[in-house]
Image: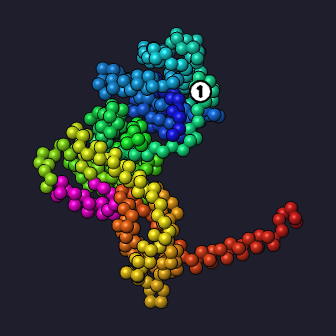
Amino acid sequence: MAAKLPTVAIIGQANVGKSSLFNRFVRSRQAIVAEEAGTTRDNVLGKVRSGDHTFWLVDTAGLKDPNDEFEASIQEQITEAADAADVILVVVDSTQYVSDEDRIVAKKALKSKKPVILLLNKNDLKGALPTDEFRRLGIKDIIRTSAEHNEGIADAIDLITDLIPPRSDSVPDDIIRVSLIGRPNVGKSNLFNTLAGKQQALVANIAGTTRDVNRVLVKYKGQSIELLDTAGMRKPGKQEVGIEKFSVLRSLQAIEESDVCFLLMDVNELNTQLDQRLAGIIDEAGKGMVIVVSKWDSVQDKDAFTRDALAPKIARTFDFVPWAPLIFTSSVTGQNVTKLFDLVLEITTRRNQEIKTRQLNDLLQNAVAKHPPAGLKNTHPKLRYMVQTDVSPPWFVIYGSNLKFIHWSYKRYLERLMREKFDYIGTPIKFSFRDEKQIKANREKEAAAAADTKKSPTRDEE
């Protein structure tokens, strides 16, 4: 396991440029940035490396009117982030005079007794005020920055690395990453909180509240599992300009980063086209998947018959991923929540199992003997041998001849046999077919090209 990395929190009012600065620090479009105060609704996490230092950077939500209940819970997150941080970056708009809100932010930061750095952002704009105007906030270290022009970022990182111990996270971790994927308001944040066992994600009855990926690390049966709560994905035509587009991208990135995805569906609104599209993306990405029917507590007449009646309907909709287990959960009652953790461990074991080549070839020969692949009149596909080339997802390469004539139904037949024999629950398995004649032809072509290059003189020789 890697050592715990230091954490640096960015706090400040809305629209002072925290997310733009965050992006400069982590050199990616990881936080949502839009011309709208309060766009970043959740903490966003990024990793910053500088020399022999590595630290987590947390972009917190903007401070807004605490009378608003939802915004009050965002304020609590800022307090939590400041408490958890090793260094706090307070960001203010250098074109605006110090406001009461800026004083509150600075006070919160200094109260934590952690090292605090004041970033005077938007320094490139006309009307940027002199540094002395901001000394009244009581923060000793002040750096003028411009996220737009990448000014002051290197100075800020140098100062941060002076304040934190050198740590390296180069040790490969054994963390299983699990993302919660689904449309808005299907109960992802509630399930995330139940799984995390604490109020880590913001939960509000507003579709699309979680706009960035939220993370928490939990331990289950000695195994570290990182949960990623993604922004809800809307149907393509219903995305708000800007923000929702970023959220969809975030969900896709979360799928890429995960080992296993929980595809959540509201029991009151099942089997939408978007759910199928998401399942397809997860399958294509080669990730483990569990289809999770949420809000089971909201069903009035929920005897076993109801579940037995629903399960086949759902299975028919997702018949292209028959390997994905289906589970009914409730974040309110906690039903089947522990079972989700058990499934994650089981799926991970299956995704990482390595099958001996002899076992694979026994299976292949038996499969061909029972049901030879169909072909054209004089060109029948010949399947000679199979090897496993990868895990997570399991990947198998079959060598032979005339393989382009293999029908997709035969590939499905081989996959079914593999699943029955080796129990690949919850994970896609991938096949590649290599035609030996084609491989030989390609090698000859490469050898001829290499010989030609040797014969033709180089420019220096000329």
Residue 375, placed above or below residue 169 = below
**In the current view of this chain or complex, which residue is farthest to the bottom?**
378
Front position in the image: 62 or 426 = 426
Query: Would residue 143 be found to the left or right of residue 174 on screen?
Result: right
Where is residue 340 shown, x and y percent of the image? 31, 47
Front position in the image: 354 or 54 = 354
**In the current view of this chain or complex, which residue is farthest to the right?**
462
Where is residue 219 shown, x and y percent of the image? 39, 39
Amino acid beneath label 1: Pro
Asked if the magenta segment contains residue 422, the reply would be no
Q: Secondary structure at mark 1?
A: loop
Where is residue 353 shown, x and y percent of the image? 45, 58
Quarter of the C terminus within the rendering: bottom right
Front position in the image: 227 or 202 = 227
- Locate residue 455: give its quadrant: bottom right
- Locate residue 280: give its quadrant: bottom left
Query: Would residue 159 be found to the left or right of residue 384 on screen?
Result: right
Residue at point 18% right, 43% down? Answer: 297
The residue stretch that appears in magenta = 306-326
**In the current view of this chain or complex, which residue is farthest to the top?**
136
Asked if the magenta segment contains residue 311, the reply would be yes
Residue at point 51% right, 40% down? Answer: 1
Residue 419, placed above or below residue 216 = below
Q: How many marks?
A: 1
Residue identified by numbered label 1: 165
Residue 293, placed above or below residue 212 = below
Residue at point 77% right, 70% down? Answer: 453
